[in-house]
């Protein structure tokens, strides 16, 4: 456990001090604040626009950060031979992968916390009290980001940062569109297309369940049971991805 | 040699890689046998691409051999717990961008299983020993190659291990840095540690190694004590000839082992079994003016060049014969 925590603490320090990531967080805060400008155009829909745009920014920048940090965690250390030094210490490779993910999760938690705080501050500035719905939506966004980060770590355990980024982003896009794919599956007549869609729907994470911005905007309730099931789903899926990453990473040659 | 006297023992280590778009097979190591006695400084020498780094990566558990096995202090690899006894420094390391050296050492120490009070004492002590300021606040991305190398050596020394495996520890360092590493290896040797290192800097290797092994194209071509190699290579003769004409003279070149310019003049090196009397008449006959004949001291560099040349020549002959035998 000590080794995992040390890897996690180092990954957290390294990511949180990263100036590029800091710039992206500041940019995201700027985008959230720009909701005020958009709200000017919305006339009587001010609150809805701020909430909609703010939640979109939190989610989009959160996913961007999780992909950027996630894919570079392992590969950056490998490129610089830092990984050689770490993996030749008395630790197992699975401990390294789990430690990296914990550090990444802690970083994303802080960064998402900053973005959420910016959104809540903006709402307070507009005289809008943050609702339970908003908190539930932010928790779901965090769960989605943690799942995406696990995907990024999984791909980076065996492929280059560029490919890992492309794979993770593609799965994120498909994962957000799974309900559409399900509808397509029901309508398709082609057996091959049906089989492919079934594999996608069955195997890929259903990320649409984490995106509840529309319900927040329209003040439709989100049950705590949905949040709980989503959390179990995100952690379960992430755990499987991390186990697979650890398995692949333990068997590969570090060249 | 008794197994208990060996820090490293490798038998039949082989490793192939697939390279390029066509996944062409490249043999990095071919049946390497290696014995590194405890408490000695062992130089692992060879040209670029010889397989030195591949061997080291197998020894520290970063690569798995395709065949063969290696033992560290009698324990078969890969064995996580044996790593507590190994200090490893990769070639030209580059560490975390945003971490300070003390933070990096604390991290490495925790991975070695060291407790916080020990680390609080050991980290400043080691930073000072490798010539870095213990209160250094700069992140490591602002460090020079030499400073990173010192950091790398400090992390390796943290648990005061019995075996040091260093990949090109003098690579990329200025003369002062190389001298520092050489002195450090000497100190470790005095403290009874086993140091196994690869290097291109043969003069430094000669100064510190008890024993050396020469690797070429994935094969071990010779291994023995430095003293044995130097004694075997000592006593070759060199003839200094006025002007550089002798360098272009095919007859002279054929008569000696090698030629090279020495300022405006020509230096002719004789083969190990050649006496000056065998060449001097030819030089006199061709009207070359002698400037000096001297028996020179052998160096590992000479041994290295001779061994690599012989091995390359043997490989060519072998290939030629193989080709001939395949011909109808």
Image (spheres, helix red, strand yellow):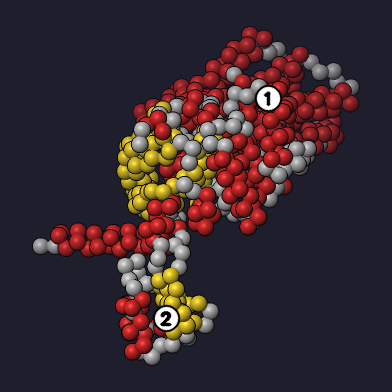
Q: Residue at x 15, y 59 (%)?
A: B326
**Is A228 placed left or right of B221 in the picture?**
right
Q: Which mark is residue B247?
A: 2
* Crowd rating for badge 1 (residues with CA inside 10 Å; few <14, some 14–19, many 20+): few
* Percent of width and height locating residue B271: 35, 69
| Disc 2 chain ID | B
Q: Which mark is residue B243?
A: none
In this view, the residue in front, A105 or B156, is: B156
Tell me the quarter of the picture where residue A207 sits.
top right
Work out whether B219 lies above or below A238. below
Q: Residue at x 33, y 84 (%)?
A: B281
* Percent of width and height locating residue B298: 44, 62
**Is B160 placed left or right of B283 in the picture?**
right
In this view, the residue in front, B41 or B217, is: B41
Q: Secondary structure at mark 2?
A: helix
Mark 1 = which residue? B118
* Crowd rating for badge 2 (residues with CA inside 10 Å; few <14, some 14–19, many 20+): some
Mark found first going from the N terminus, 1 or 2: 1
* Percent of width and height locating residue B286: 35, 89
In this view, the residue in front, B222 or A29, is: B222
Residue extending furthest toward the left: B328
Q: Residue at x 78, y 37 (%)?
A: B135
* Percent of width and height locating residue A56: 71, 30
Q: How far is disc 1 from disc 2 in space, using C-alphas? A: 63 Å
Q: Secondary structure at mark 1?
A: helix
**Is B31 placed left or right of B153 in the picture?**
left
Work out whether B248 lies above or below B47. below
Tell me the quarter of the picture where residue B253 sits.
bottom left
């Amino acid at each position: 456990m000590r080794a995992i925590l040390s890897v996690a603490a180092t990954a957290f320090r390294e990511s949180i001090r990263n100036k590029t990531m800091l710039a992206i967080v500041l940019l995201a805060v700027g985008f959230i604040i720009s909701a005020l400008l958009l709200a000017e155009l919305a006339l009587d829909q001010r609150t809805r626009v701020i909430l909609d745009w703010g939640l979109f920014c939190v989610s989009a920048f959160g996913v961007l950060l999780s992909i950027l940090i996630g894919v570079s965690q392992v590969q950056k250390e490998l490129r610089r031979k830092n990984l050689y030094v770490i993996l030749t210490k008395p630790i197992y490779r699975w401990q390294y992968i789990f430690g990296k993910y914990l550090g990444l999760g802690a970083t994303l938690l802080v960064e998402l916390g900053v973005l959420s705080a910016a959104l809540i501050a903006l709402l307070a500035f507009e005289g809008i009290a943050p609702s339970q719905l908003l908190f539930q939506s932010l928790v779901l966004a965090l769960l989605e980001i943690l799942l995406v980060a696990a995907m990024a770590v999984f791909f980076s355990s065996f492929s280059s940062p560029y490919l890992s980024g492309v794979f993770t982003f593609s799965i994120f896009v498909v994962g957000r569109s799974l309900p559409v794919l399900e509808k397509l599956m029901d309508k398709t007549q082609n057996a091959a297309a049906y089989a492919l869609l079934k594999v996608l729907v069955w195997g890929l994470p259903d990320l649409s369940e984490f995106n509840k911005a529309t319900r927040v905007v329209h003040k439709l309730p989100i049950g705590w049971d949905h949040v709980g099931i989503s959390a179990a789903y995100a952690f379960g899926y992430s755990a499987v991805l991390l186990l697979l990453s650890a398995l692949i990473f333990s068997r590969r040659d570090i060249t | 040699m008794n197994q208990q006297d060996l820090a490293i023992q490798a038998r039949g280590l082989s490793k192939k890689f697939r390279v390029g778009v066509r996944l062409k097979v490249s043999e990095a190591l071919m049946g390497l046998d290696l014995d590194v006695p405890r408490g000695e400084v062992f130089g692992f020498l060879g040209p670029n691409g010889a397989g030195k780094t591949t061997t080291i990566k197998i020894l520290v558990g970063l690569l798995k051999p395709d065949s063969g096995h290696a033992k560290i202090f009698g324990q078969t690899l890969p064995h996580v717990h044996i790593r507590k006894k190994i200090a490893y420094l990769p070639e030209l390391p580059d560490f975390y961008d945003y971490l300070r050296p003390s933070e990096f050492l604390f991290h490495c120490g925790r991975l070695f299983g060291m407790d916080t009070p020990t680390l609080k004492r050991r980290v400043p002590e080691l930073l000072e020993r490798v010539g870095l300021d213990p209160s250094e606040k700069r992140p490591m991305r602002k460090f020079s190659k030499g400073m990173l190398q010192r950091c790398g050596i400090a992390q390796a020394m943290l648990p005061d291990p019995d075996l040091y495996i260093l990949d090109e520890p003098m690579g990329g360092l200025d003369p002062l840095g190389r001298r520092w590493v050489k002195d450090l290896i000497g100190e470790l040797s005095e403290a009874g540690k086993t140091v196994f290192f690869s290097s291109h800097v043969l003069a430094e290797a000669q100064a510190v190694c008890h024993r050396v092994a020469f690797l070429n194209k994935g094969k071990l071509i010779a291994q023995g004590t430095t003293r044995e190699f130097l004694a075997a290579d000592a006593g070759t003769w060199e003839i200094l000839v006025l002007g550089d004409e002798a360098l272009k003279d095919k007859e002279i070149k054929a008569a000696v082992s090698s030629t090279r310019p020495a300022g405006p003049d020509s230096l002719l090196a004789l083969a190990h079994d050649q006496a000056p009397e065998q060449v001097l008449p030819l030089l006199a006959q061709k009207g070359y003016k002698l400037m000096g004949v001297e028996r020179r001291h052998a160096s590992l560099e000479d041994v290295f060049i001779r061994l690599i040349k012989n091995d390359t020549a043997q490989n060519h002959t072998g290939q030629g014969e193989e080709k001939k035998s395949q011909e109808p």
